Structure formats: structure tokens, C-alpha cells
Image (cartoon, rainbow, N blue to C red):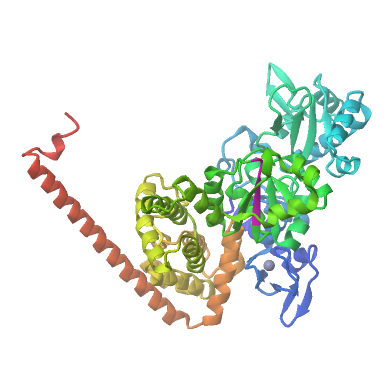
């Protein structure tokens, strides 16, 4: 699971970085009993909710649920991937990392890319663009243009705006500085091919450096100044930059997002710059893409609620559907708002000011409500029975499909059902029944393109089955030696709830290779912060309940019964199908099924 690196080295890196030392670099920790506590950096914390267990080397926030080992803390705090977090912490203690084998890396010409080197080149380029704006002849008119757009000189400095000029000036300057063209190519600052030569990617453009949450420059956006080509272009995807997982302004906005609990998402660079200069500094922007699950995952670490602001009247059903999916998959509240009169947020802020912009945010409509009212509109507001029925039909089907592909806990599902019940005026029992019907339908259609992320079905009715899966994980995380019993009866494949199944496969894999593995060793194989948080949660709730052996027996029993029932259902389904085929054959004469289709 550690991907690029040898597992023993990963464990070494983990052991060499004491979790208290690492967290103390970000959070002030004080001793309280056997643990250390501090203000949690992952939510708006007023009393110290972050607990760090020194002996177990794990952290857990009792308010927002964030938890994990030292890798997870660094991943979440600095918004790094699992392997980047390993690299960062290896560097911190001076451990040299070697890729496991050449073959275990994805085969690409970029296998020797070093993200830290790319960040350094980007930093150099950001300075170079900034200096162009001030020192070059062409900079003058661009500064005038910026002033016309009412972007202040402070903003220009704060956001490090710059200028890309023509004539392959960046390549030439970089060469004079001794920066290898190969590195420039890996940053996406130049484009072209070996042989035919390289040229600057950004030409005559106003440059916006894009940073990650730690302030590293990971890419650039460029606005055309001579109306050639697209209005805005971004850096291509690199080892450092992926626009569907990056947000412009997150570094500057995150503290305010944490303290207000709300992240406001707009579409453009200048919208963000203008919002911050007017004092609305919890605003970030997507980089020319729609709001993705990746964006949701990042913002969830800082915000309880996300408000998406759309230009003019572009917030249609499409946008609502995507937002709804992210909302359900990432367990984050999303509300939608549109800027009136076809303006973009930047113009609106200039014309109407901070208060009206904040009002827009306050009045944003919850995504469920939004989707429902748009549907009700399109089916006619006159409340004819047929119109209402088709609206309900489509609404529930969308939600069922999202529910099926997401990882929802029972509590969250309950909250959603309550919300639906208020919006469409059916009681929760009816809604549950309708959703269950539709989830069956969604599961059937989707089972043709299942990837290993998704599982066959979500069990809305059989609560006990999900509870049993949880119990087994809780027990094993506390009594790893009981794995001997478990592995004779079930495999990770028997877990139907996606997030539990993911956890089970990490746990089973670890215990197979390292019998009796400790919690930190298991966490060192969990790549996602979600999995890390869940593992710590399960370990702790398991510890509190104790009675490991009897709970395990009960849970294994329940899973056995469920498996038998499923098999019975499958056999019945096959029987039904056979009967159906037989009837078809009887009705169409004595044709054999083998002779149809092929001849
Ligand atoms: Zn927290």
C-alpha cells in the first residue's frame, strides 16, 4: 500500500518522526493526563479537541473526527499525497528514500521527476514574471490595465501577479541561469518537443502563480493580454499540479475558512483577488474546472459548509447535480448562489460591495433544495400530480445513484432522508422505501462499470450487517491475534460497505504479512486521510467496548447468516430467470437458446 517505497523504510520514517514533535510544529500542545491536547487545526476549534497519544503515536480530534498517524497529520495539514508526506517526513529526519523497484512505479518518462525541484523552478519563474511586470517596457501598459480593473498595487504584491512576455524570454533567461530545459519542461512552463525545440507556454499573459496550502508555487494561470488564444490558460498537469485537486487562494483563505466554517468557491482568479481585497477572505477559486470531489475533499478539512457562487445564471441543473454528488460523496454541506444580472463576482463586488456579496453568500440555497426547486420548475409549478410525480421520481433517482456510489454511514443517511422529507413532503418511511427501490436499480445499472472503488450494493435495510463488519474491524485493531480466527471464515471481499471494505483490505493485508501488527504499522499502510481517521476511530471505540472474543463470534455469525441469505436470493434469482427463459422458449416454439444470435 505504500506505493513507491519499501514498507520497512516507510515504517522507519514513521518511527523516526515523533508525532508530538511534528504536530507541535503546527499546534501548541499541552500535557493533560497521559495525553497531549491542543486546538485542532482541521476545524474551528475553541476548546482543545485534538488529542495526541504519545505511546500509541496517533492523534484524534473528538470534535471533527480527524485522526491518524504522523503521515496523516502531515498529509491533511499540508495537503500532500501519501507519498509526498512520506518524502517530507523522510527529509525532516534525513532518511534517504529509494523507490521500491523501478517496476512498481507507473511507467512514464516522468518517473525521475522530483516535485521539490519543480517547486523551486516555479518559485524562480514566479519571481521572474513579477520582475517583468515592474522592470520590462511591456509591463507599463499591463499595470495600467490592472489599475483599470481596479486591482490595487497591494493586491498585485500579495498575489504576486506577473507578466509573461514574448520571444521565448523565459527559456533564454532560464538557460542563462543554468536551469535545465528538462526541468522547465516538467513544470509545464515550456512546451514543445525534443528536436523541434521548445517555446514558452505563456506568452503575453498576465500571470497568476498558484500555490498549495504551504505556499509552494505549484503552477500558473495566465490571462491573455493580446486576445490571442484562450482567455485563460493553466499549467498542464505535472508531478506537482493537478487542477482538479487545486484551489486558487487556499493558502491565503484557509485561516478565515476555518474560523468562519464556510468556504466560498468562485470561478476566476480576479474574483478571488477582489473578494480578499474587499475583506471577504474565505474565498477560493476552481481553476477553470467545475467543482470536483477532489475540491470537496480538500475543503472538508477546513470548512463545514461550501458555498458555490456561479457567474450570472449559469447555475443550472448540471451544476446542481455535480454539487449534489460531491456533497453526498464527501459528506459536506453545499449551497449554491448566482451573481445577479449576468455579472461575475469581481464586477459584482466592485459595484455592490462587501455587504451585498456577503448577503449573497448568506442567502445561498442548500443543494438539495436547489435541485428540487429547479426540477419542480421544469415540471411545472402548478402542482399537477403528474408533474410532481416525475419531479420526485428524478430527484430520488439522482440521490439514490449518488448514495449508491458514495460511502455513507447510517447516521448521515438518516440526516439526508430527514432533509428530503422536509423538502418534498413525504415521510421518512416512504422516502426510505423509495430510495431502497432505486438503489437496487442504480446498483444493477452500475455493476457493469464497477471499478475496485465501488462495491455491489449498499445495504439500506440490513443495518446489522454493516454493524457486524464494523465490529470485526474494531476487534482486530485491538486484538490482532484474533485474525487467525477471522481469516478462516471471511475475506475483505465479504465487507459490503465501501469504506469498511477498504479498511478491511488494509488491515487483512498487514496482518497477513506482519502478524500482531501495531496500530501505527497498520496506519503506515493506509494512504488516505479518510481511511486513517476511520482506523483510529474504530480502534478507540473498540477499545472502549472490550469483550473482544464474544463480540467477534457474534459478528462472524451475522456475516455468515447474511452470506447464506444472499446466496439463497441469488439462487432464487437464477431460478426465476430459468423459469422466465423456459416460458420464452415455450412461447416462441422449440428454438434452442444456443442457436439464437449466432446464426
Ligand atoms: Zn478537529
Instruction: Magenta stretch: give its range.
Output: 306-312
Of the pair 523 and 413, the residue shown nearer to us: 413
Q: Would you say residue 95 is visible in this rendering?
A: no
Query: Against 63, is 86 above or below?
Result: above
Which quadrant, please, contains the C terminus? top left
Ligand 1 quadrant in view: bottom right
Q: Is residue 347 left or right of residue 72?
A: right
Of the pair 436 and 113, the residue shown nearer to us: 436
Name of the residue lying farthest toward the top: 196
Query: Against 271, is 86 above or below?
Result: below
Name of the residue lying farthest toward the left: 590
| Residue 544 location, quadrant | bottom right
Could you say where residue 281 lies in the image, as x and y percent from the top left?
78, 53
The question of residue 191 being in magenta is answered with no
| Residue 19 location, quadrant | bottom right
What residue is shown at x 93% (from left), y 29% (from top)? Answer: 135
Could you say where residue 520 lies in the image, as x and y percent from the top left?
62, 66
What residue is shown at x 77% (from left), y 58% (from top)? Answer: 256
Predominant secondary structure, magenta span? strand
What residue is shown at x 75% (from left), y 36% (from top)? Answer: 220
Could you say where residue 369 lies in the image, as x and y percent from the top left?
54, 56
Amino acid at each position: 500500500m505504500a506505493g513507491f517505497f519499501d514498507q520497512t523504510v516507510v515504517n522507519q520514517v514513521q518511527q523516526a518522526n515523533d508525532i508530538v514533535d511534528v504536530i507541535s510544529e503546527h499546534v501548541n500542545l499541552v500535557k493533560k493526563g497521559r495525553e497531549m491536547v491542543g486546538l485542532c487545526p482541521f476545524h474551528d476549534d475553541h476548546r482543545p479537541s485534538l488529542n495526541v497519544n504519545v505511546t500509541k503515536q496517533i492523534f484524534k480530534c473528538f470534535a471533527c473526527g480527524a485522526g491518524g498517524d504522523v503521515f496523516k497529520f502531515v498529509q491533511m495539514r499540508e495537503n500532500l499525497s501519501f507519498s509526498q508526506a512520506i518524502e517530507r517526513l523522510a527529509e525532516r529526519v534525513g532518511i534517504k528514500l529509494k523507490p521500491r523497484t523501478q517496476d512498481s512505479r507507473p511507467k512514464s518518462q516522468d518517473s525521475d521527476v522530483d516535485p521539490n525541484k519543480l517547486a523551486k523552478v516555479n518559485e524562480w519563474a514566479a519571481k521572474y514574471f513579477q520582475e517583468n511586470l515592474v522592470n520590462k517596457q511591456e509591463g507599463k501598459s499591463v499595470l495600467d490595465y490592472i489599475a483599470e480593473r481596479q486591482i490595487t498595487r497591494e493586491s498585485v504584491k500579495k498575489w504576486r501577479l506577473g507578466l509573461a512576455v514574448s520571444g521565448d524570454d523565459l527559456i533564454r533567461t532560464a538557460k542563462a541561469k543554468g536551469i535545465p530545459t528538462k526541468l522547465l519542461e516538467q513544470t509545464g512552463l515550456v512546451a514543445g518537443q525534443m528536436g523541434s525545440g521548445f517555446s514558452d507556454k505563456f506568452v503575453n499573459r498576465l500571470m497568476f502563480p498558484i500555490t498549495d496550502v504551504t505556499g509552494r508555487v505549484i503552477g500558473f494561470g495566465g490571462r491573455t493580454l493580446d486576445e490571442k488564444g484562450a482567455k485563460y490558460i493553466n499549467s498542464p498537469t505535472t508531478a506537482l499540479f493537478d487542477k482538479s485537486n487545486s484551489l486558487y487562494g487556499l493558502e491565503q483563505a484557509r485561516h478565515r475558512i476555518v474560523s468562519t466554517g464556510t468556504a466560498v468557491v468562485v470561478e476566476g482568479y480576479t474574483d478571488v483577488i477582489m473578494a480578499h481585497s474587499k475583506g471577504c477572505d474565505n474565498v477560493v477559486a476552481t481553476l477553470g474546472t467545475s467543482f470536483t470531489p477532489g475540491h470537496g475533499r480538500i475543503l472538508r478539512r477546513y470548512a463545514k459548509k461550501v458555498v458555490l457562487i456561479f457567474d450570472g445564471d449559469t447555475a443550472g441543473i448540471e451544476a446542481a447535480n455535480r454539487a449534489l454528488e460531491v456533497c453526498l460523496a464527501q459528506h459536506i454541506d453545499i449551497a449554491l448562489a448566482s451573481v445577479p444580472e449576468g455579472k461575475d463576482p469581481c464586477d459584482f463586488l466592485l459595484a455592490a460591495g462587501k455587504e451585498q456579496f456577503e448577503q449573497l453568500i448568506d442567502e445561498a440555497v442548500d443543494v438539495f433544495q436547489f435541485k428540487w426547486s429547479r426540477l419542480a420548475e421544469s415540471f411545472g409549478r402548478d402542482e399537477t400530480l403528474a408533474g410532481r410525480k416525475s419531479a420526485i421520481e428524478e430527484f430520488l433517482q439522482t440521490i439514490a445513484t449518488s448514495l449508491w456510489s458514495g460511502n455513507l454511514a447510517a447516521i448521515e443517511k438518516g440526516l439526508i432522508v430527514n432533509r428530503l422529507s422536509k423538502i418534498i413532503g413525504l415521510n421518512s418511511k416512504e422516502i426510505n422505501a423509495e430510495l431502497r427501490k432505486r438503489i437496487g436499480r442504480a446498483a444493477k445499472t452500475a455493476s457493469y462499470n464497477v471499478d475496485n472503488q465501488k462495491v455491489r450494493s449498499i445495504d439500506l435495510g440490513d443495518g446489522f450487517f454493516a454493524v457486524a463488519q464494523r465490529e470485526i474491524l474494531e476487534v482486530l485493531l485491538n486484538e490482532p491475534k484474533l485474525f487467525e480466527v477471522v481469516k478462516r471464515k471471511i475475506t475483505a471481499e465479504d465487507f459490503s460497505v465501501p469504506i469498511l471494505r477498504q479498511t478491511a483490505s488494509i488491515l487483512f493485508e498487514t496482518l497477513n504479512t506482519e502478524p500482531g501488527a501495531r496500530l501505527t504499522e497498520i496506519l503506515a499502510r493506509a494512504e488516505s486521510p479518510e481511511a486513517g481517521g476511520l482506523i483510529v476511530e474504530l480502534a478507540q471505540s473498540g477499545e472502549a467496548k472490550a469483550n473482544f472474543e464474544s463480540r467477534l463470534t457474534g459478528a462472524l455469525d451475522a456475516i455468515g447468516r447474511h452470506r447464506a441469505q444472499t446466496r439463497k436470493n441469488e439462487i432464487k434469482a437464477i431460478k426465476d430467470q430459468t423459469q422466465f427463459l423456459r416460458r420464452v422458449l415455450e412461447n416462441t416454439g422449440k428454438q434452442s437458446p444456443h442457436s439464437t444470435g449466432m446464426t
